[in-house]
Amino acid sequence: MTATDIHRTIDAVWRIESARLIAGLTRVVRDVGLAEDLAQDALVAALERWPAAGVPDNPGAWLMATAKHRAIDMFRRDKMLDRKHVQVGHELEAKQERAVPDFEAALDDHVGDDLLRLVFISCHPVLSREARVALTLRLVGSLTTEEIARAFLVPEPTVAQRIVRAKRTLAEAGVPLEVPRGEELAARLSSVLEVIYLVFNEGYSATAGDDWVRPALCEDALRMGRILAGLVPQEPEVHGLVALMEIQASRLRARTGPSGQPILLLDQDRGRWDQLLIRRGLDALERAEALGSGYGPYTLQAAIAACHARARTAEETDWTRIAALYDALLELVPSPVVELNRAVAVGMAFGPAAGLALVDALTTEPALKGYHLLPSVRGDLLTKLNRFTEASREFERAASLTRNARERELLLGRARSSASSKPAL
């Protein structure tokens, strides 16, 4: 195995094992920042030793053992006792030689619980939304600071500062290293799901930059969602979100053309949709439906996505059901964006005039003032009504509002097409 192959192997092992490693360390050292430092030390050791000694038979166990030894050394030097004696109390006030074996044994317990704690810590509501996303991708998604910065098109120092501040905020707030229960679990779980949803959406439809989709972000969100579904299998909305992401991800290959140009849903080659992901998504949707007494917001969105997935052609799509599902979603999460999506469904189910009436009612909505999809949807409905000059202006306005280069090209192309169209006789 060449040095390049070994480094690729180390990178793959780190992405698989780092969250488990940091989670186990966090439970014992009670400091997510210190836990990540210890895990990083183990990674550095692997980079130094594996090229010469070869990759161990169980690389994950090797990293864990190395991190353990680093942590135990810190105990023996009293550095960790100095930093953590107030939080840990009597456990670390015991004789040093007794603390070491207890610490070592503790790291081997409850891997699933540890990982769940790490997810809830990373997505704690005490952090800003941006900090939650950055910290979750760093600790649970195993992305580097550079990768997170590139994915969200922000400077690397900005991401680094968010992560540092997030760790400091968690420490200063004394966030308990435990999975919440009862009502607090429901409240905190919504924060976790929101972060995963935000990451997936940024990958599925990038808000800015040169690429319309970023599949790697979708994969990271899906991986986190699947892990969470395994850790809290009785939570219907977790399965609902996984179902939504599986079905949406099934279209990724069909969403762009050979040169990366966007392809809209109704124009996609459905033969390129990933049937395995669709089946996984529909299975997850069934689990969500079986567990819940009613649909939550993610399960409703998954049910909408399922309507598209089940239609063999665009013409077979059950738009009436989709419009009804959006009605239900509006009752749960009233939002101008949901209203706009409902208007699209109504326009498809009951005619463009009906959809346009709903969209026109949203044109004075402050929350949609700079939202490029409002004029885009309006332009599409005006095109179907043969009002091409108005449609062209709407597409041009939408193009001026989007920060995504590929989407801007698409919208300007639609503006030119509408400007050159003539009403049917």
Image (cartoon, helix red, strand yellow):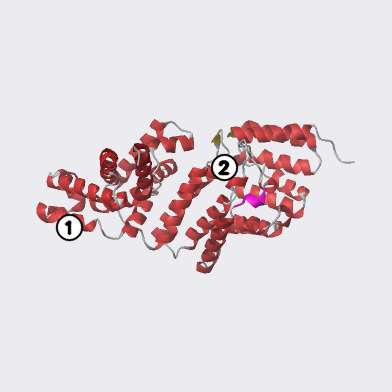
Magenta stretch: helix, strand or loop mostly:
helix
Residue 137 sits in which quadrant?
Answer: top left
298 sits to left or right of 389: left
Residue 217 point in image, percent of width and height: 48, 44
Q: Secondary structure at mark 1?
A: helix
Q: Secondary structure at mark 2?
A: loop
Residue 272 highlighted magenta (yes or no) = yes
In-front residue for pair 99/8: 8
Quote the CA–CA distance across marks 1 and 2. 48 Å
Q: Residue drawn 81% across and 41% down? A: 386
Magenta stretch bounds: 269-273
| Residue type at the position of mark 2 | Ser
Q: Residue drawn 78% across and 32% down? A: 419
Disc ID at residue 102: 1
In-front residue for pair 56/148: 56
In-front residue for pair 7/198: 7
Residue 35 point in image, percent of width and height: 27, 46
Residue 207 sits in which quadrant?
Answer: top right
Vertical order, 394 against 278 (above or below): above
Q: Which residue is mark 2?
A: 205
Residue 174 point in image, percent of width and height: 28, 49
